[in-house]
Amino acid sequence: MPSPSFPRWPGDDPVEFRLTEHPIEPAALMRGLADTRAGACVTFEGRVRDQNDGRGVRALDYEAHAPLAVREGERILAEAVERFQVIDALCVHRTGSLALGDVAVWIAVTAAHRGAAFEACRFIIDEAKARAPIWKKEHYSDGSTEWVNCATRGPESPGPG
């Protein structure tokens, strides 16, 4: 299996959810998504930002129950493929310690048309945050830390269905 920073091999499953402790390299991952059936490719990068809910953030830690996270992540991607007629869906989520600006999660979706790709990408990030057993610990500028609830969907996400 390729590393989290390198593309998938030709013929790999079109649905893949990965966890990695290594930096995510979107350009390398994009090379594995070439498909002449795809008229659209939508990507999402979730990055570590310097604030949350009015508090200064200096770093994050992510932990996951890896077997369950991968299984649920692949279930989410399979739902997106079926629901939105996606050609390919890939999600890579970091674990471990991350610095400001690091990519924490990267998603790519290919589809014949842009509408399906945009909708599927939004569905995947919202469902992954709500359903995958991945936890985030924020390290604040004042020296305190707090585990924050990642189990949320975006306000406009329709949920599974």
Image: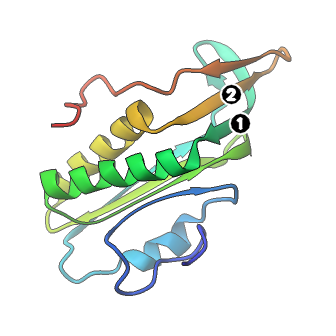
Tell me the amino acid under the disc marked 1: Asp
Crowding at dot 1, Cα within 10 Å, few <14 / some 14-19 / many 20+, comes out as some
Dot 1 corresponds to which residue? 61
Residue 10 is situated, as x and y percent measured from the top left of the image, at 38, 87
**Quadrant including the C terminus:** top left
Q: Residue at x 21, y 74 (%)?
A: 38
Where 20 sits versus 4, above or below? above
Residue 69 is situated, as x and y percent measured from the top left of the image, at 49, 46
Image-based side of 155 in relation to 141, left or right: left
Residue 60 is situated, as x and y percent measured from the top left of the image, at 70, 34
Residue at the far bottom: name it.
10
Image-based side of 125 in relation to 8, left or right: left
**Disc number for residue 137:** 2
Crowding at dot 2, Cα within 10 Å, few <14 / some 14-19 / many 20+, comes out as some
Q: Residue at x 21, y 46 (%)?
A: 119
Where 44 sits versus 158, above or below? below
Name the N-terminal-most of marks 2 and 1.
1
Total of numbered circles in the picture?
A: 2
Residue at the far front: name it.
67
Q: Residue at x 57, y 49 (%)?
A: 66
Where 76 sits versus 139, above or below? below
**Disc number for residue 128:** none
Query: Element under label 2?
Result: strand
Tell me the amino acid under the disc marked 2: Lys
Q: Residue at x 14, y 51 (%)?
A: 83
Where 17 sits versus 46, above or below? below
**Quadrant including the N terminus:** bottom right
- For marks 2 and 1, give the CA distance: 5 Å
Query: Element under label 1?
Result: strand
Relative depth, front residue between 149 and 35: 149
Q: CB of mark 2 within 8 Å of CB of mark 1?
A: yes
